[in-house]
Amino acid sequence: MKQEETNNPVTIKAVRRYRIVGALMIVFLLVVFGKILKTIFVEGDKWRTIGETLHRPEPVDLAPIRGNIYAADGRAVAITAPYFRLYFDFQADPLKAIKKDSLNKLLDALALNISRKLSTQYEKIKPADLKKKWREGMAKKSRYWPVINRDISYLQMKELYDMAPLARVPRKGLGPIPRSIRPEEKAKRMMPFGSLGSRTIGSVYGSMEGGLSQGKNGIELFYDKQLRGEIGKASRVYVGGRRILNTIQAPKRGCDVYTTLDMDMQSIVEVELRSKLEEVQGESGTAILMEVATGQVKAITNLQRTPSGGYIESKNYAVADMSEPGSTFKTVSMMVALDAGIVHPEDIIETGNGLFSVGKRTVRDHNAHKGGYGPLTAAQTIWYSSNVGVAKIILKGFAHDPDKYVEAVRRTGITDKFRLEIPGEAPAVVRKRADNPDRWYGTTLAWMSFGYETQIPPIHTLAFYNAVANGGRMMRPYFVTKVMDRGEVVQEHRPVVLRDSICKHSTLIAIQDMLSNVVAKGTGSPVKSSTVNISGKTGTAQISQGKSGYRAGGTMHLVSFCGYFPSENPKYTCMVVVRGPRGVYPSGGGISGVVVKQIAEKLLAIQEPEPFDTVSPLPDIKYLPTVRAGQREPIVSALKSLNLPVRIASECGKNQWVRPTVESGRISLKPLPSVKRGVMPDVHGLSAQDALYMLQLSGLKVRTNGWGHVVAQSVPYGSKVKVGQTVVIDLSM
């Protein structure tokens, strides 16, 4: 039976079929296995190269443009300007297609142009060094190798692309080098006014966090959340061997912050403080200018001496310095005593020989070595800054209950919390005995009365004197007026009254009279001006060296003056502090007071027009030079240096953009329309640099053609434009 099945034709046919199928499968597997071996060992390099060009789409975060910070008049003080980093793709097809000799010649030309255009007096770029770096990138077959390890501006990049081998060739288009280089746009924080107010305006870190810029200090840090914007989303794909970015969600630009700062005033304040610091070789200095009626801080500068002897903006001493204020605090003590009825301005205080024993210590007047002041009125103790006089007044009224004195001091508002828009604000400290009885001594109250045993940041002293100038009303100092998001106000700050009255009206009148006489008859006599009446108080204090005391390594002084002007109708309050003057007598009036005087006189000069009869006659000039449009101040300075006649239209603001014309034998400056976001400005006649600056302030991207000044713009003046829109300007000599 089994033999019959084996010989069955059907069975034999099936077995043959299975054998054929099995043989075919074995052959197929051998072929596949062979192909795999060939792919791995024979064609491996080829397929790995191809694999490098095949990429899946990559998600990419798009960094937003950080918002701008503006001065009170709308001029930008911190902007984000576009910068570029150039990268070679050494695997790009155009680069592979050219011969080695031709490639070397093109790279030689590129290296030479970069050396010529981008070298500076501080950093010389050598063509040989560039080529050496590029060869490293070629050897590694890098697709992302820096052409030069530096960010360059749009104008610098434009210059490079206007020269061979990057320039477009007529009728041929771009050559292999520009087709193998990819510019990558970056954003860099710029400060158009340089160091002016830089510590208050702040700075940003060079690196980003989560794709967002980070404020480092000042307003940049306090308003970091509003300024930095929101991240956008994109997808990076590879097409034809090149990277292409497809935007999925555009980044949201940061908000703009408008400050109270006036950069013309800021310039005056910083120049005067710097000049005095250089003269007396001070360790550091602070100057603050505040508008009396509103509390707006119009100018603020903090300068620190460097090892080389120069001065730079550093720590914001104005809001963070916890030094003892010295004699400027006597005004607070006198206000407290007058308000409590302990003394009247005409009462006689015996200061004797300028020495007064309190416990085991001696209160000393600055003229004790000359025999002291003897009998003074209470008012004169402020005029002449008598430590003995003020200490006797306060001890008479509060020795039995010193905490009552401290409570009265706090009611003046000098220790109020301001919640400033500047990180690092330090609190003003006037401590009670009850706060720490073990650290309250028999001498504490006396020394506290003339500004020791307290810690008052300069801006708190300024706010107190501002209240005296403002009829007793204490205003909160502030630095920012509004925050705007694409033209819409999202946050607004108005003047805030912290206290309607810091003392009785009769007390205020008496204090104002004393501060006027400090300058007219007392220690503030160096502050006396022939053009503006100034009232205020001098201050001199020894600076504590911590646990080492006041005399470690030699005595260091803090000299200050805080006052307001004009006395008859106060408009501004100003405080100047100089720490560690050398080689001169440490006088609050003779050092800091003189700075306040010079600031007051110069502010008056720029705010009040010169009387007509004081204007000098025009020189007889037949030929006037051609002057291009631009910012007012540089043009005026240049014309004055050449002794050329210039007429400034009354509607021109400081540093406003102007267009010069020749009228009646003199150059007349007329204002260009102000820059408004969303509206195309008129840049005709401006230099390329000024035009770029103005257009970037408008939120526009710019392409230039040619060299020189602007002769044409692609978008007509006054047209509506969108932020990020590209505008082309034509330049000509």
Image (cartoon, helix red, strand yellow):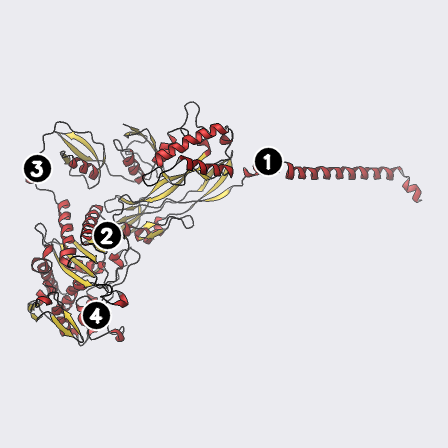
Mark 1 lies on residue: 46
Residue in the image at 26% along x and 39% along y: 675
CA gap, disc 3 and disc 1: 84 Å
Q: CA distance from mark 2 to mark 3?
A: 35 Å
Q: Which residue is mark 4?
A: 407
The 10 Å Cα crowd at callout 3, few under 14, some 14 to 19, many 20 or more, is: few
Q: CA distance from mark 4 to mark 2?
A: 32 Å
Neighbor class of circle 2 (other Cα within 10 Å; few <14, some 14-19, many 20+) is: many
Q: Position of residue 121 (x, y in %)?
A: 31, 39
At numbered mark 4, what does the secondary structure look like: helix, strand or loop?
Answer: helix
| x 67%, y 39%: residue | 37
Query: In which image quadrant can residue 399 be found?
Result: bottom left
Labels 2 and 3: the sequence-earlier one: 2
Q: Which residue is mark 2?
A: 301
Inspect the image, locate mark 3, and give the three-letter code of the amino acid beneath it.
Ser
Residue identifier under label 3: 616
